[in-house]
Amino acid sequence: MIVPVTRSRTVITALCVVSVLALGACSGSDPQPKFADPTPTVPSSPSTTAVSGPIEPTMPAAAQGTDAAAAEAFVKFYWEMVNYAQATGDLDGLRSISPADCEACQRGVDYLDSVFRRDGRVRGGENSLSSISSGPVGGDGKRRYVRFDLSNTRQVVAIPGHRDEVYRAATVHGEAVLVKTPTGWRLEYWGKQS
């Protein structure tokens, strides 16, 4: 049975979307990260130095099918996008996979947008999924549920001029409902399992 998410788990209800590990070095008065000046020397061979900071996830090929494994891969991808949006403040990718009719999706995106527009920062709260399973919804084969355990680390939401919001680490049993469209999976709903 699908049950609406309660306000008591605001961050989980709002996509568990508040970890901004990469923004931890920024302050409200200096929202742009500072980098050391590059060295003017030219390397003699191609650089193998890794790019620092989060890299936007891409839709995995495994999520493009219509079976249980594809639905589960899509839900994993969704939460990777949540983590990326939280860490960078870049909400475009998350918005693109958060349909307007998914209330929990929209509440999460709106919450993050509100935090970042007010020069807020969030530390911690990275999400991870485990115990993933899925099955069909209805008889047409176009809708699937995906159940999972969603864990997040302790998080602190800091907005200038407001008291910090602190959320302890937690795990909830979540459920998502997805519908297969011609362009791929679409998240219809997610919330806590009863």
Image (cartoon, rainbow, N blue to C red):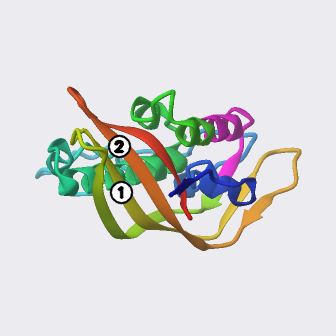
Residue 53, position as x, y percentages in the image:
42, 53
Residue at 25% x, 57% y is 49
Seen as rendered, the residue at the extreme left is 45
Q: Is residue 59 left or right of residue 154?
A: left
- The disc labelled 1 sits on which kind of residue? Val
Toward the viewer: 19 or 98? 98
Quadrant (top left, top right, bottom left, bottom right) of the C terminus: bottom right
Q: Which mark is residue 178?
A: 2
Q: Which mark is residue 146?
A: 1
Instruction: Decide if residue 12 is in sight here.
Output: yes
Residue 99, position as x, y percentages in the image:
45, 30
Label 1 crowd (10 A; few <14 / some 14-19 / many >=20): many
Q: Main secondary structure of the magenta part?
A: helix
Disc 2 secondary structure class? strand
Residue 157, image quadrant: bottom right
- The disc labelled 2 sits on which kind of residue? Leu
Q: Label 2 vs label 1: CA separation?
A: 8 Å
Q: Are marks 2 and 1 in contact (CB under 8 Å)?
A: yes
Q: Which residues are magenta?
A: 110-122
Up/down of 64 relative to 79, above or below: above
Q: Which mark is residue 179?
A: none
Q: Is residue 89 left or right of residue 117?
A: left
Give the mark nearer the N terminus: 2 vs 1: 1
Residue 61, position as x, y percentages in the image:
14, 46
Q: Is residue 183 left or right of residue 137?
A: left
